Amino acid sequence: MKVIDLSLTVDEETQFPGFPRSKVYGKADSKNEIRKVATVEENKASSHEVKLCTQHFTHYDAPSHYFVKGLDNDEVPLDWLVGEAVVFDMMHKQPGEAVTAEDLENSGVEMKPGDIVVIRTGWTDRAFGTFEFWDKMIYLSTDAAEWLMERGIKSLAQDFMTCDSPLHPPKGREHSSPDWSPNHQTFLGNDVCLIEWCTNLGAIQEERVLFSCAPTKLKGTEGAPCRVFAIEGLL
């Protein structure tokens, strides 16, 4: 058995750790803080206070991320986020390119209904923490989202954008449009959770693995930071 960590390390120093709100719709970007509030030397035990946006670093989106009446983070059943996963290798994708239905179809990977789907491009490993990560984002096409839905996906984990490039969406799908970010609407509207900014996906050697996304159980939030990992050798 081999356990593979797929989670980014949370810190205060990383630049651009989450969706660039300031550039997309004019809201201030969140900052992360990790502050020591007790020490072993002074208090016999150490503890920290943490301020962290739910959409920063490796995290997942619950349905309420896009739907007012969707399930919140603390209401999502854990079996939506744990189970057998199938890996699509898209490491050949270049900055700014899309992962399409044709790419998935031609991959030769056999997807089963109820699978958690992992799509890897290596983009988080290459560029997370830089402006380029957002500016030249690899993204998932709408026909790829439809392809996955037709085959009974349970949850989607990836290291690139679930939908259009956030800074360069196609005409008619800008943030001011009702058609903004259609793949989020498609997945979350059907209770397919999105596990975003995974890292180290290239370390997975097997096509089918046991997959786990363990979010912090924050009440009333639209998502949460996660420890994500895959286990090889059990299937």
Image (cartoon, rainbow, N blue to C red):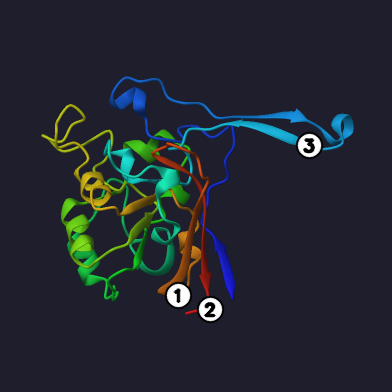
- Percent coordinates x, y for residue 173 in the rendering: 15, 36
| Residue that appears at 51% across and 45% down | 217
Q: Residues within 10 Å of mark 2 (few under 14, many from 20)?
A: few
Above or below, 173 relative to 200: above
**Residue type at the position of mark 3:** Ser
Above or below, 15 relative to 217: above
Query: Which mark, by number, is residue 46?
Result: 3
Identify the residue under disc 1: 206
Is 216 on the left or on the right of 132, as rendered? Answer: right
Q: Are marks 3 and 2 in contact (CB under 8 Å)?
A: no
Mark before the other along the chain sequence, 1 or 2: 1
Q: Residues within 10 Å of mark 1 (few under 14, many from 20)?
A: few
Q: Are marks 1 and 2 in contact (CB under 8 Å)?
A: yes
Query: Which mark, by number, is residue 233?
Result: 2
- Percent coordinates x, y for residue 201 in the rendering: 46, 60
Query: Which mark, by number, is residue 33?
Result: none
Mark before the other along the chain sequence, 1 or 3: 3
Task: Specify the quadrant of the image occupied by residue 68.
Answer: top left
| Residue that appears at 78% across and 37% down | 46
Is 47 on the left or on the right of 119, as rendered? Answer: right
